[in-house]
Image (cartoon, rainbow, N blue to C red):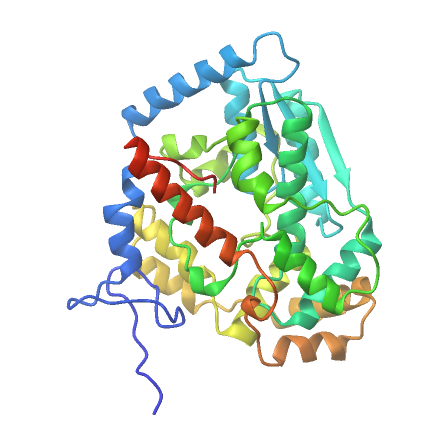
């Protein structure tokens, strides 16, 4: 007998997250985690403003005499675009990186150009060999894992972090934020930074060698870059009263930013992956996590979120067009793309991964904290 469907009475997360837990009042673990842990790292007030000013001052101090005092990855999405404007206001001198993995929409290209032009930034674009991206993306589709965006995400962050250390830059400015991304069910996907998993999937299903596509190792990501190279990730939006609707309005007014119409519309593949592949293959509607985050941060009400969830994920004609576009670009038939979308999903754990290394790192962290009586932050 199938388990009864249940939705949290406070946010809109439900049993599509198999690890969700409800208390006796029907409130889920995501809400409790936000209240007890996540909210303590969120400062959308005057306290945050003072903390951010102090952080900015330190970045400028550490960057004296250098060409750049920080680095920012610019995807063309609202978060990174708005952040690019804000760090200009703060007088920082960023190295601006865009990683082109072949899926940029025309609007994304337009928006990036307008932001860079307005801010007076010098844009460094890393164009990854399309044949390698295509081969890796098809391998991921064949693997059947949930997180199909690993191919783009890993390329983006690996390139960003390598650029950071090569240019002896200490601070990575990230658009990640609690206001819209605090709810993040671990059961829905696996870390995009797991190069072991990425290479295992490509080894089994890929056809060509990855020569141009850069990866970042577990050791680099968790230890060498943060502890030896002293690389730090700063998320300024967590120190602001960040509202994506207001941010979008400001971007439109200041740089002529053009709206995508849906989250992650800057990438045609990500749009397809989140709005069709995940709901069809894994019964995952990522709107639930995003909307729940906005409920908990006070940006919208639960009733507003429920109305949003009633809207269709895809326009039928648009979906048909995207199926044809993605299949053609990947060099596979529409029928094959439909087949991998509708077939049974697979866990990333079916392929070699870094889970055992993470457990070891956590154990080392606990031992060091016990010996030194200090909190040791493992990079994430």
Image side of residue 219 versus residue 117, left or right: left
Q: Which quarter of the rendering shows the N terminus?
A: bottom left
Is residue 141 visible to the viewer in this orientation of the structure? Answer: yes
- Comparing 218 with 128, the one in front is 218
Image side of residue 346 versus residue 340, left or right: left
Above-or-below relation of 334 to 304: below
| Residue 68 picture quarter | top right
Q: Position of residue 288 (x, y in %)?
A: 41, 62
Above-or-below relation of 279 to 357: below
Count the labels in the image.
Answer: 0
Image side of residue 122 versus residue 361, left or right: right
Q: Position of residue 315 (x, y in %)?
A: 60, 68
- Comparing 9 with 236, the one in front is 236
Q: Which residue extends farthest top?
A: 65
- Comparing 336 with 145, the one in front is 145
Is residue 374 visible to the viewer in this orientation of the structure? Answer: no
| Residue 236 picture quarter | top left
Please tell me which residue is depicted at 25% across the width and 60% down the height of the picture: 10
Q: Position of residue 274 (x, y in %)?
A: 56, 62
């Amino acid at each position: 007998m199938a388990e009864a469907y249940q939705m949290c009475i406070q946010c809109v997360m439900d049993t599509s997250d198999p690890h969700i837990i409800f208390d006796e009042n029907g409130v889920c673990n995501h809400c409790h985690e936000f209240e007890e842990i996540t909210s303590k790292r969120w400062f959308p007030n005057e306290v945050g403003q003072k903390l951010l000013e102090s952080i900015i001052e330190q970045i400028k101090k550490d960057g004296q005499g250098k060409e750049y005092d920080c680095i920012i990855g610019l995807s063309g999405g609202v978060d990174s675009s708005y952040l690019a404007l804000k760090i200009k206001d703060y007088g920082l001198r960023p190295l601006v990186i865009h990683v082109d993995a072949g899926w940029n929409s025309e609007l994304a290209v337009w928006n990036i150009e307008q932001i860079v032009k307005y801010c007076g930034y010098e844009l460094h674009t890393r164009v990854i060999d399309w044949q390698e991206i295509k081969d890796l993306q098809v391998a991921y589709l064949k693997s059947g894992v949930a997180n199909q965006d690993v191919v783009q995400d890993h390329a983006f962050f690996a390139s960003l972090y390598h650029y950071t250390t090569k240019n002896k830059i200490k601070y990575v400015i990230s658009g990640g934020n609690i206001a819209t991304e605090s709810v993040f069910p671990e059961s829905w996907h696996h870390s995009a930074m797991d190069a072991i998993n990425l290479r295992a999937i490509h080894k089994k299903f890929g056809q060509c060698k990855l020569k141009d596509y850069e990866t970042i190792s577990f050791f680099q990501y968790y230890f060498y870059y943060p502890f030896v190279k002293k690389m730090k990730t700063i998320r300024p939006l967590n120190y602001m009263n960040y509202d994506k609707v207001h941010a979008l309005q400001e971007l439109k007014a200041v740089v002529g930013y053009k709206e995508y119409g849906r989250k992650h519309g800057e990438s045609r593949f990500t749009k397809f992956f989140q709005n069709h592949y995940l709901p069809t293959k894994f019964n995952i509607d990522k709107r639930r996590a995003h909307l729940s985050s906005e409920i908990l941060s006070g940006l919208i009400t639960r009733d507003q979120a429920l109305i949003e969830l009633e809207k269709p994920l895809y326009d039928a004609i648009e979906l048909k067009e995207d199926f044809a576009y993605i299949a053609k670009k990947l060099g596979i038939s529409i029928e094959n793309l439909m087949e991998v979308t509708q077939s049974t999903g697979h866990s990333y754990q079916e392929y070699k991964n870094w889970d055992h290394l993470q457990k070891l790192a956590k154990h080392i962290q606990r031992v060091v904290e016990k010996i030194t009586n200090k909190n040791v932050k493992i990079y994430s």
